Amino acid sequence: MAVLDEAPPWLGFAARRLGGVLLVLTALVVITFAIVQLMPGDPARVAAGANATPDQITRMRHDLGLDRSVPAQFVDYVGNLLHGDLGRSFHTQENVADIVADRLPYTAELALLGIVVILVVAIPLGMLVAVLCQNGRRRRLDGAFTFVTGFVGSTPEYVLGTLLVYVVGIKLGWLPVAGAATVDALVLPVVAISLGPVCTIARIVRRETAVVLGQDYFRTARGRRLPARRLYLRHALPNLLTSTLTLAGLLLAGLLGGTVIAESVFAWPGLGTRVVEAITQRDLPVVQGVVLVLGSLACLINLLIDVVLGLLDPRTLSGKAAGS
Amino acid sequence: MTATRVRKRARPNAMLVTGLVGLTALFVLAVVAPWIWGDRADELGPSVHLGSSGEHWLGTDALGRDLFARTLVATRLTLELAALATAIASIAGTVLGTLIWVSGPRVRAVGLRVVDVMISYPAVILALTIAAILDPGPKACVIAIGVAGCPSFARLTANLAASVAGRDFVATARLLGVPSLRLMRRHILPNIAEPLLVLVSVSFAHSLMALSGLSFLGLGVQLPDYDWGQLLSTGLQSLYTNPAEAVGPAVAIVLAGLSAGFVGDGLAARAASTSGNSAAVKPGSRKASASAPVATGTDHSVPDDAVLVVSDLRVRRPDGTALVDGVTFHIGAAEIVGVVGESGSGKSLTAMAAARLLPGGLRAEAHALELRNPGAEPLALAAPGRDGAAVRRRLATEIGIVYQDPSASFNPALRLGGQLTETLRVHLGVSRREARERAVEQLEFVRIVDPEARLRAYPHELSGGMRQRAMIASALLTRPRLIIADEPTTALDVTVQAEVLALLRAANRRDGTAMLFISHDIGVVTDLCDRVLVMYAGRLVEELTAAELRDGHARHPYTKALLAATPRLEPDGEADGKLDAETGDGLLAAIPGRPPQPDERPAGCAFADRCAAVLPVCRDTPPPVRVLAPGRTVACHLPETGAPVPVQAGPKAGRHDAAVEAVG
């Protein structure tokens, strides 16, 4: 209710979001550090290999710093992180930072393309259906939309991926089904990870659009007899994007998880396939590094969504908690 | 009516039923499949990697085991794991949410932030982390997925608790000193059970897919155990040789996820349909009551300078029920005409029909419904179909609309300036600068200080009264011929109300703008308007000048009842001079009963049931509209010269019969 605040509202907004990011990053560092501490059994034994002598294990324990106190280890861990040192793989002795640098572009490529595809397809689709079906018109289209999106939306990416590999890759032979050697190899993985979220988000958009179309302010806009494009794009889109992105933000961040799984379907050389390999081999430094990077990536996506939300809806800037 | 409504609510919802049937089938399968097909699923066969055949529907795997049987048997383990993970998520999450909510406001704020952050972290990555800490296997995965699902439950519980806690009964309980935890258990949890149940089914679907996904990656269920995800991953490897191998688990995963999702969606839809009975368009079950014959011969001499002409206007629902039923009036140049009536009388719909802005699904038909302008063709407001650009321009610029709720009628995402100047810019091609100048001018007229700054503000940065004044400024910007104000003061407090009325009057004087003013408050209407139309149950029951109304010349029992139900502050009456609502003493007379629903309007006078002076003829014959003088009509059977009709005081029982006796 207040009149304009003295401090620019985005300052508080930025401070809150930055606080959130720091919180997540701290939590990530603690959790990844804990991976080694919490694992049952002796990490040094795992690191030294199955055939290691007790001497070798002791030396390994010393090399890894595991013989020191936990706080000292944590300080070391954080210090190394700050220097960009993520440790070495137990198995290949590779530098984990190098592994990440090697694999990250593939995963990021997949996830970002997926997000773009999702937003570009789902938002217009949902709006279109909502506008076409408003006031109970075109019930059949509405029903078909609900059914198809419900069906595909609840099909996990690894099932979709398997299906795509079979139909498009094997039966039709149109696109490569594995690896990342060529550009067209991107198509199937991107479709596999984005198809489900496209459907789910299109449904959300459809519902949110219907809500906006029934709002008083939308009636006001109708009362100005604006051309359809202006009416829907200027008066409906920002409002439905706010609520849609709030809901869909989770899906978009969750897309990273889907990417990790889908990579296995398509033998995609990203972080996902590498971390699965590392987990089965109990290659802890690699797991730590990849989890840290994936987590930060998720955090980044969330931050981006928050910023977009802040730009779209001035009320989120001043903090929703203030409202009654 | 109530009976039909109850039946409508209880009607099973197809989605929910489908989902429940699917889940039940899966559950039964999970119980019986290992007994029936268990042996067959583990039986090694001579023929490996067999394609689909009559004997082996989905073929056989690398060890010659029947894949159809294996898929069925895997149901148990898959569902068990998903149910376990869901249980962990829902129980731990709800407890966490409750704890967050019952702890003090500061902890609550921090707790909710942390939960928000946790939610935004992808469950699969968390699961990978936990799987890495524990040994890969079903236990690690169930814990991981359960923990990952926890924050959603915590947030839902805390948010719902907060929203329920805002309601009156909880506030009352809190005032009475009910402790937080008990408040949660007794008053809040029962009220939020439904959304929680929705989340449980959604969460079950997610858990099932995530767990299958982890098994698919080889991190979940380990051989010799198998679940659908594990079967699918071996299926993927033999996709070239036996594509049928992947079909079973793929279909199973999708069906299970879909069923659980359907249950969630169905529950949510049911919740929405029982709670969301908004006043919008309710699908009526009955056919339209026979439209009453309009009293014809209404001599509505429409003056040449009329701005709005409405003749025999009907607004119908899709099922044909008339919500506004044969309304005729006009508004002359610079005239302020008020429409007054209870909610449901059709006054706002009349206004929205005149604005050509009826809510979707409703349609207007009229003998004439037009906006007149000396310099142009009359603009038909009830024409079906889409409007061309020229018509839209005239509608936008010749009619200004002031809406009821100023806090909801501005777009929250756009700055005020853009919204105010939009009509000028879009329809009249006015430059941005000039449009702003004109907006500033109008904002000054409605006495908004520092108008330049307000144009840069968002609607939520203004007070309610300021928003309504800005709305009036917005309506005045194009210098419209007609302003339609739909209960513009209802959402405002009394002092602001007076300001808004003064502004409307000032605008009327300054520009000579005609005005259609809708209100349920006959006092306000009498103050502001030149002429007053009284509506009841979709029809006009009386039309008279404000002066006549002020001088006590109202004839229709309904108008009199409205007057008697309105406190008047001017000490001009004798009995109703200075009354106070608290002592009451029969001075403020509430009108007993309620107006009939649109689809239940009687054949006779719709007010008959509530009328103190009802005659037998009122019940079956619609009252004729009697024209007493130009612009002076009344629709009533009572002889207008009759004795003053007594108005019932207070909600007395036995209204019809007693009343009939009293009169007859």
Image: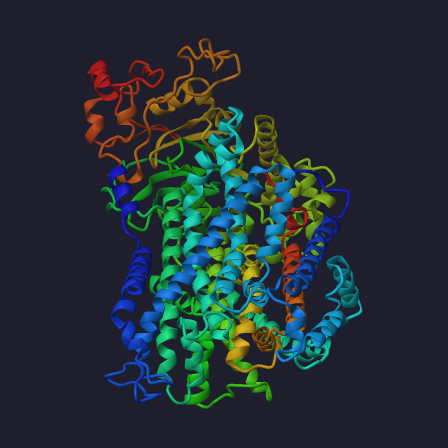
Taking the spot 33% from the left edge, 29% from the top edge, the residue there is B594
Q: Give coordinates of residue B296: x percent, y percent.
A: 27, 37
State the residue in front, B434 or A71: A71
Residue at image coords 39%, 61%? B80
Q: Quadrant of the C terminus of chain B?
A: top left
- Does residue B574 appear in the picture of this structure? yes
**What is the x, y in percent for residue A138?**
36, 62
Q: Is residue B486 left or right of residue A314?
A: left
Residue A196: % across, % down: 47, 69
Relative vertical location of residue A173 with respect to residue B276 in this rendering, above or below: below
Question: Please, is residue A15 above or below residue B493 in the view?
Answer: below
From where the camera sits, is residue B277 visible? no
B72 relative to A181, above or below: above
Q: Residue at x 37, y 52 (%)?
A: B267
Give x and y (percent) for residue A280: 56, 75
Position of residue B450 in the picture relative to residue B300 (left or right): right
